[in-house]
Each structure stands twice: as structure tokens, then as C-alpha cells.
Image: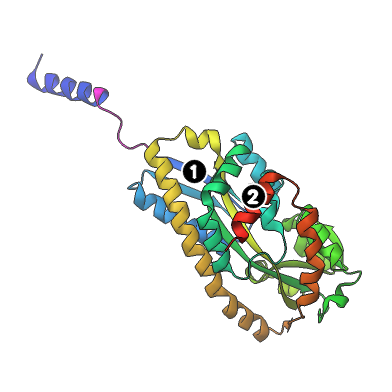
Amino acid sequence: MSNRVLTTLATLAALAAAPVAAQEYSFQVAHTNAAGEVQDMGLQKMKDLLEAKTDGAATLEIFAGGQLGDEQQTVEGVMLGSLDIGMTSNAMLSNYVDDYKVFDLPFLFPSIPSLGEKVDANFDMMEDSANGAGFQLLAVFSSGIRHLMTSEPVEDIADLEGMKIRTMQNPIHVEAFRAYGANPTPMSYSELYGALQSGVVDGAEGASTGYDGMKFYEVAPSFALVGWLNMTAPVTMKKDAFDALPEDIQTALMEAGAEAASWQRQYVVDQEQPLLDSFAEMGVTITEPDTAPFIEASQPLYESQLTTDGQKALFDALTSE
């Protein structure tokens, strides 16, 4: 046998015996926001960070705009393992992670930075809650401060009387808008533009980023700055799937998630005023109702909706000085 053949065989044997070089991991991530919205930008940042931390061995394949289903299908896809990672509103995830109902309460955090500070300080507690429901919490993004988009201007809480307002499919949101005098109408995000256009609903609650990204100003030309909810957008994975990953990939996912969340929350803050200015330039009617009646009407929810020890413990941790 020639020396060349022997050398080739020896090389192949060495390669077979050697440990496999860094395996590539491509995680499919789904969400329902438009590409380029603040939530999507956070995932793009997380992708860049993950690739940098793993020297390209791991990446995210991001599917925006509900390409892989609505929010409920996204959460259930993660639960079933048919989807690697999901990012949804907390309002949807809290139907599965019961402790997270705390984040659905109105007027809980005065600003996005204050929310971020509390989330970061209590991330371990939130992670335990997610683990108990079969999820791994990777990051907590912001979906912005939620206001009101309507066909007719809302100058004060009395103007909501009898108005059909789309809410997320979340019982606390429904009860909040019932307390504000509206007729809450839960429906999926993908149906909202058509519902506003056809008059099925008179308005909806939402953030300025979504109002812009989905062009809701075309069918709801009034925007009332109520700031009723400071909404989070958790990024989650099935816990069993996460636990099955190599430790270095787990670490990279968690670090990329934390760093992307910090960056994304500040990005949301930076976008708010320029967006409001652009709405005014487009002719949107922007009003600033007195929020005191909204806050007062929200107070009973703090008693009626926090019913478990886990919810109360998380609420106490998030609201402690």
C-alpha cells in the first residue's frame, strides 16, 4: 500500500476519532409583529449577539408578522417543540405561565426603564415561574407603553362609554376596559386592521410602534395617550429542549437574551417621541386624556386578579422599593 494511501487512511481515522467541531444550531423564532418593529429589532440584536458569542455556531432564523401562526399558535408551538423559540405579548403567555398575570395589570410601572430594572432584578424568580410551566425564559423585551387608537378622538374616559375596543385575548385586559366603560372585544392581532377598517370595532389599545408598523393610522386616525399598560414581550423556549443543548450554547442564549433585552428596551424609549411627531405630521389627532380616572378604575383589578401565592409573591418583588 502506498505511503499516500496510508497517510489518507490515517487522516480519516484521526478525523473520525476526533471530537466533532462546534455544531451549528439554527433556532427558528416566531412572532406576530411586523419586521422592523421594536420587538423584531430586539430579536435581530439577539441574533447578532448569539452568533458573536458562539463564533457562528448558533444563530436565529426569525419569522416576523405571524408567518408561523398567531400568538396562541406561537406559544403552543414552543410548548409542543414544533417551534424552537417564541416571542409573544405577556398577555398571551400569562395564560400559560400563571404568575405572569402580574404584568397584565394596568399602570404597574411608570416607565420602560423602571420596568426593565425590576425585571432584571427579579429575573431568576421569573425564570422559575416559566420553568414550572415547561418554558425557559431567555429574555424580556418591551412592547412599549400602550395607548388607544380609535376612529373618533378620546378626550377623557367618558368618551369610551360603549365603544367597542379590541383587546388582547386576556381576561385582565378585558376586565380593565370594561372598568373604563368600553365594550371590550378580544380578537387576534392579525384580524385588527380589517376590524378597524370595517367598523367591527371602534378602536383598540396598542403601542405607538404597532400603530406605526401595522399602519393602523390609516383606519384609526385618533391616538389617545393613556399609557394604560407597560407591556413586556417575553422570549421563551421549551425547557426540555433548552436543557438538551450543550452548556456553552445554553450560556450563549441566556447572555445574548439578557444583553439584547437591555438594548431593545432602550431602543423602544428612543423611538417613542419621533413616532408621535410623525403621527402629528400625518394628521393623526393626538389627545392626552386625564389618566387619574383610568388609574382609579383599575385599582379593583389588583385585588380581584392576583389570586395565587406565586402571583402575589412576584407582585411584591416587582413593586418593592
Residue 228 vertical position relative to residue 21 in the rendered view, above or below? below
Q: Is residue 226 left or right of residue 250?
A: right
The amino acid type found where label 2 is placed reads: Ala
Q: Residue at x 82, y 79 (%)?
A: 156
The residue positioned farthest toward the right in the image shown:
162
Q: Residue at x 54, y 68 (%)?
A: 113
**SS majority, magenta:** loop
Q: Is residue 20 magenta?
A: yes
Q: Residue at x 63, y 40 (%)?
A: 77
The residue at which mark 1 appears reads as 27
The image position of residue 60, as x and y in percent, is: 47, 48
The image position of residue 178, as x and y in percent, is: 86, 63
First-in-chain label (1 vs 2): 1
Answer whether residue 68 is visible to the viewer in this image. Answer: yes
Q: Are marks 1 and 2 in contact (CB under 8 Å)?
A: no
The residue positioned farthest toward the left in the image shown:
3
The residue at which mark 2 appears reads as 313
Q: Residues within 10 Å of mark 2 (few under 14, many from 20)?
A: some
The amino acid type found where label 1 is placed reads: Phe
Q: Can you tell which quarter of the image residue 49 is in?
A: bottom left
